[in-house]
Amino acid sequence: MSRNYKFHNPEGLYFISFAVVGWLDVFTRNEYKDLFLESVAFCQKNKGLEIHAWCIMSNHVHLVFRSIKDQKPELLIGDLKRFTSQSIVKSIQENPRDPSLKVRIGEAEQKRILVGFF
């Protein structure tokens, strides 16, 4: 998927999807879904994100949104993704065991793999 979204009408309504790197099932853990929703709420309140529909799957997200407050949509989505990924990586580093990996490995190895993906 392209990392550079193409938004030709800054005030338009857009559908986008973005996946977790490596298609890891990160959003199977409620804590990580909550971090994403906190990021969305922050962008709604402070950045001009207007959400019309959304769906969080185990390894990707769908959004129907538009940008208000004269914010460029590509910058808005970039901020949302950046803040969310930083929050999730920090949480992964702090969690003792993470069910996002479907194999049984040691805690240190699991963290190394997840953080390495991000």
Image: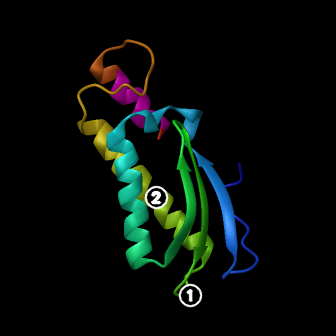
**Kind of element beneath mark 1:** loop
Q: Nearer the viewer, residue 115 or 14?
A: 14
Determine whether the residue tagged by mark 2 lies in a helix, strand or loop: helix
Q: Is residue 116 above or below residue 18?
A: above
Against 100, residue 55 (above or below) is below
> What residue do we see at 72% from left, 72% from top?
7
x, y (%) of residue 6?
73, 68
Per the rendering, the mark at residue 82 is 2
- The answer to the question of whether label 1 and label 2 lie on touching residues, with beta carbons closer than 8 A, is no
Looking at the image, residue 4 lies above or below residue 74: above
The image's mark for residue 70 is 1
- Residues in magenta? 110-117
- The dot on residue 10 is none
Q: Is residue 14 left or right of residue 54?
A: right
Q: Amino acid at mark 1?
A: Asp
Of marks 1 and 2, the one in the foreground = 1
Residue at 70%, 77% (x, y): give it.
12
**Of label 1 and label 2, which has the lower sequence position?**
1
Characterize the local packing of mark 2: few (<14), some (14-19) or many (20 or more) Cα atoms within 10 angstroms. few
Residue located at (55% from left, 49% from top): 55
**Number of callouts in the render?**
2
- CA gap, disc 1 to disc 2? 20 Å
Q: Residue at x 60, y 79 (%)?
A: 72
Residue 75: % across, % down: 56, 72
| Quarter location, residue 42 | bottom left
Residue farthest along the top direction in this orientation? 104
x%, y% of residue 19?
59, 44
For the residue marked with disc 2, what is the amino acid?
Arg
Q: Horizontal and vertical percent for residue 80?
A: 47, 62
